[in-house]
Image (cartoon, rainbow, N blue to C red):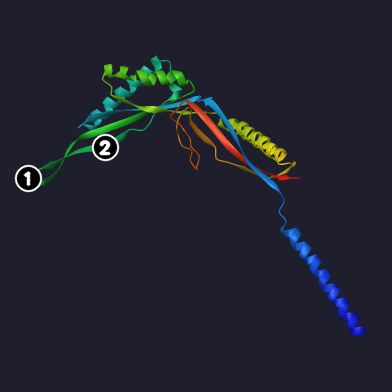
């Protein structure tokens, strides 16, 4: 009789344990409902810093004379920029680059005879960094006036930047977060649930492109420097629990 009772108790214990364990597995594997949305923050802005560079050079078989001629060009260029209203502290002349020039000689039948020294080329770059964007733009377009002084100044397209970029990023993150929250709330209401607490927030790549351009976004973040008028954008991916 005792053996029968023990067997019954043992069987009940096994069944009870199975129910408890089964319930625990179900609760452990039960997924909490979530909503994931991506919000966009985007704004247009105008660059407030321009960086413009131009090159000038002299060629001569006499290195000393080449330096002297380049120095005269530098002085003329500096005076020209100052006459256009630029402060000298925004004008930077970089170090002079010196290259030896050689001519390759061949016989009429194509046999190589060696090279012949033809002179030195001295090149210098002038860079202007200014917040007066329109003034520097105008100068960059009119710089051909120096040709009348015999100075060959080769202009490089200006680059445009924005000095308050960090403040802009903060504003756009807030905008993208608000945009994502509104979307998540709308989805929850339309699905008959309530939006719970925020569980995950992921910031996307910050992108800067030219306004009204067809530039592609990149995984590393596009950063346009060729356009004065730009568009900045950032995304925020938010995941909310639902009740």
Left or right: 97 with respect to 237? left
In the rendered structure, the answer to whether residue 109 lies left or right of residue 149 reads left
Res. 70 in view: yes
Q: Give the Cα distance between marks 1 and 2.
A: 30 Å
Q: Earlier in the sequence, mark 1 or mark 2?
A: 2
Q: Quadrant of the N terminus?
A: bottom right
Q: Which residue is mark 1?
A: 109
- Which residue is pictured at 45% across the width and 24% down the height? 90
Q: Residues within 10 Å of mark 2 (few under 14, many from 20)?
A: few
Looking at the image, which residue is at 71% across and 49% down?
A: 33
Between residue 104 and residue 74, name the one nearer to us: 104
Residue 21 pos. (x, y %): 78, 66
Q: Which residue matches tag 2?
A: 99
Of all residues shown, which one is farthest toward the right?
A: 1
Q: Kindly identify the residue that appears in the image at 87 percent across and 78 percent down.
A: 8
Displayed quadrant of residue 67:
top left
Element type at mark 2: strand
User: Residue 158's spot in the image, x, y percent?
Assistant: 41, 27
Secondary element type, mark 1 = loop
Q: Quadrant of the C terminus?
A: top right
The residue closer to the viewer here, 92 or 233, is 233
Q: Which mark, by number, is residue 190?
A: none
Of marks 1 and 2, the one in the foreground: 1
Above or below, comparing residue 115 to residue 119 in the picture? below
Q: In the figure, residue 236 lies in which quadrant?
A: top right
């Amino acid at each position: 009789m005792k053996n029968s009772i023990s067997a019954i108790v043992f069987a009940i214990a096994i069944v009870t344990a199975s129910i408890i364990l089964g319930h625990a597995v179900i609760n452990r594997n039960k997924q909490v409902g979530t909503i994931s949305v991506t919000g966009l923050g985007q704004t247009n802005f105008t660059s407030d810093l321009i960086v413009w560079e131009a090159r000038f050079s002299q060629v001569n078989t006499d290195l000393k004379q080449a330096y002297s001629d380049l120095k005269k060009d530098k002085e003329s260029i500096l005076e020209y920029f100052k006459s256009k209203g630029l402060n000298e502290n925004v004008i930077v002349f970089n170090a002079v680059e010196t290259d030896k020039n050689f001519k390759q000689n061949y016989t009429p039948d194509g046999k190589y005879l060696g090279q012949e020294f033809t002179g030195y080329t001295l090149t210098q770059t002038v860079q202007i960094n200014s917040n007066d964007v329109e003034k520097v733009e105008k100068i960059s377009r009119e710089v051909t006036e120096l040709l009348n002084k015999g100075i060959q100044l080769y202009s490089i397209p200006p680059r445009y930047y924005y000095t308050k970029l960090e403040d802009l990023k903060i504003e756009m993150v807030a905008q993208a977060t608000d945009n994502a929250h509104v979307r998540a709330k709308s989805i929850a209401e339309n699905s008959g649930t309530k939006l719970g607490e925020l569980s995950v927030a992921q910031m996307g790549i910050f992108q800067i492109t030219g306004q009204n351009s067809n530039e592609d976004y990149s995984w590393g973040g596009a950063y346009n420097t060729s356009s004065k008028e730009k568009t900045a954008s950032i995304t925020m991916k938010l995941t909310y629990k639902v009740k």
